[in-house]
Image: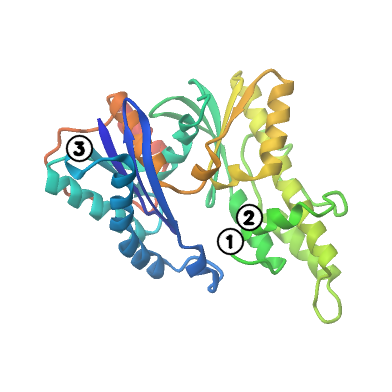
């Protein structure tokens, strides 16, 4: 079965073709970073309009790369949530239009399930069960993944997500958008030990996270370091960036290892945009190697939002018998707020 998948939950337009037998056939992605940069963040209306401009040319590009035509498709998939409502509607409506025109089933996919299963696109691929550290822009969660559709929440952030902590700290330091990657690049040249920053909830005894206090600590420290003109020296900015990154990585790694201890598992999967962070990757690779386990990441190009993870999640659901392929209705909705546990509830039902 060949599935064409659409991702449009925020500021990336992604389309991909996946075969249930051969895996990923082709994918294409357009990032809106350059458009939103001058505003310092994502403008939802502009994001929606840009998805409309990009989605059909990207679909044509994917089919051309894969050597397919629309008549070769057996199903379509799309991100139904969570995300920006207008942006989600673009991908959902285009996918449903394809499905209606060709008489194909349309499979709604949870955005975080796409991230959660994306490391299975890498080689070697992890076997179930495993612990997953999900660190996308607005989410930080630890999950026990027993299989496709079998997700148990172990812990999550009580306030800011790790990605938000990166972005907000970057803004405090005067870095551009997107803040997280900019802060990480600056941190490579800094001294992470020069400033002592808190590691919120690292020793709380549970698997939850909190990052709002870290942002406040960086704000307080940066104010104390500014000159009378209100300017931070380049060295202060660089060292604060390194200290912030080190604090976030310490918390993420510490909680992930605690989750492995609590579940008795030895396989860790890291998914989401923050999973591209080099310091986090090195830290977890060393830690898992030392304890005889293994950590898995999606390919770097698939860490951000992309169509491949949506099409692949749909393919895995089809293989697991969890996708409704027989519905003749093409009525649909999107869910800007959607708990991943709801996917498990419907699966169980």
Between 144 and 330, the one lying in front of the other is: 330
Question: Residues under labels 2 and 1: Cα distance?
Answer: 6 Å
Question: Tag 3's secondary structure?
Answer: helix
Between 301 and 66, the one lying in front of the other is: 66
Q: Is residue 251 above or below residue 235?
A: above
Q: Earlier in the sequence, mark 1 or mark 3?
A: 3
Q: Position of residue 36 (x, y in %)?
A: 50, 68
Query: From the image, which quarter does the N terminus lie in?
Result: top left
Q: Position of residue 222 (x, y in %)?
A: 79, 66
Q: Residue at x 86, y 80 (%)?
A: 228
Residues at marks 2 and 1 touching, judged by CB atoms closer than 8 Å: yes
Q: Count residues near mark 1 (Cα–Cα under 10 Å), then give few for <14, some for 14-19, many for 20+.
A: many
Q: Residue at x 28, y 57 (%)?
A: 56
Color scheme of the displayed model: rainbow
Query: From the image, which quarter does the C terminus lie in?
Result: top left
Residue 222 appears in the rendering:
yes
Residues at marks 1 and 3 touching, judged by CB atoms closer than 8 Å: no
Q: Position of residue 110 (x, y in %)?
A: 37, 42
Locate residue 258: give its quadrant.
Answer: top right
In this rendering, would 100 be left or right of 150?
Answer: left
Q: Which residue is mark 1?
A: 178
Q: Is residue 40 above or below residue 153?
A: below
Residue lying at the far bottom of the rendered structure:
229
Image disc number at residue 72:
3
Q: Position of residue 9 (x, y in %)?
A: 39, 54
Question: Residues under labels 3 and 2: Cα distance?
Answer: 38 Å
Q: Residue at x 50, y 31 (%)?
A: 122
In this rendering, would 163 be left or right of 317?
Answer: right
Question: Residues under labels 1 and 3: Cα distance?
Answer: 38 Å
Q: Which residue is mark 2?
A: 181
């Amino acid at each position: 079965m060949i599935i064409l998948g659409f991702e449009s939950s925020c500021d990336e337009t992604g389309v991909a073709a996946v075969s249930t037998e051969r895996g990923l056939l082709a994918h294409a992605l357009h990032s809106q970073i350059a458009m939103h940069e001058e505003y310092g963040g994502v403008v939802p209306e502009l994001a929606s309009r840009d998805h409309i401009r990009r989605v059909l040319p990207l679909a044509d590009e994917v089919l051309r790369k894969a050597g397919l035509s629309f008549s070769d498709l057996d199903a379509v998939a799309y991100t139904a949530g969570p995300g920006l409502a207008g942006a989600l509607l673009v991908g959902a409506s285009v996918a449903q239009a394809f499905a209606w025109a060709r008489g194909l089933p349309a499979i709604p996919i949870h955005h975080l399930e796409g991230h959660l299963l994306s490391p299975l696109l890498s080689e070697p691929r992890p076997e179930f069960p495993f612990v997953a550290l999900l660190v996308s822009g607005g989410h930080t969660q630890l999950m026990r993944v027993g299989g496709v559709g079998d997700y148990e929440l172990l812990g999550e952030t009580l306030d800011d997500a790790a990605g938000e902590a990166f972005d907000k700290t970057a803004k405090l330091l005067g870095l551009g958008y997107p803040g997280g990657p900019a802060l990480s690049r600056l941190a490579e040249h800094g001294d992470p030990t020069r400033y002592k920053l808190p590691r919120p909830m690292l020793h709380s005894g549970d698997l939850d996270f909190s990052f709002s206090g870290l942002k406040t600590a960086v704000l307080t420290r940066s104010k104390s370091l500014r000159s009378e003109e209100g300017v931070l020296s380049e060295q202060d900015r660089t060292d604060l960036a390194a200290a912030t990154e080190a604090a976030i990585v310490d918390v993420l790694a510490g909680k992930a290892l605690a989750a492995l201890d609590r579940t008795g598992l030895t396989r860790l999967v890291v998914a989401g945009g923050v999973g591209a962070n080099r310091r986090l990757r090195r830290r977890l690779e060393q830690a898992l190697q030392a304890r005889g386990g293994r950590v898995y990441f999606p390919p770097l190009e698939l860490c951000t939002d992309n169509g491949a993870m949506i099409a692949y999640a749909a393919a895995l659901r089809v293989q697991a018998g969890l996708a409704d392929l027989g519905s003749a209705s093409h009525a649909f909705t999107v869910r800007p707020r959607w708990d991943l546990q709801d996917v498990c509830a419907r699966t169980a039902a």
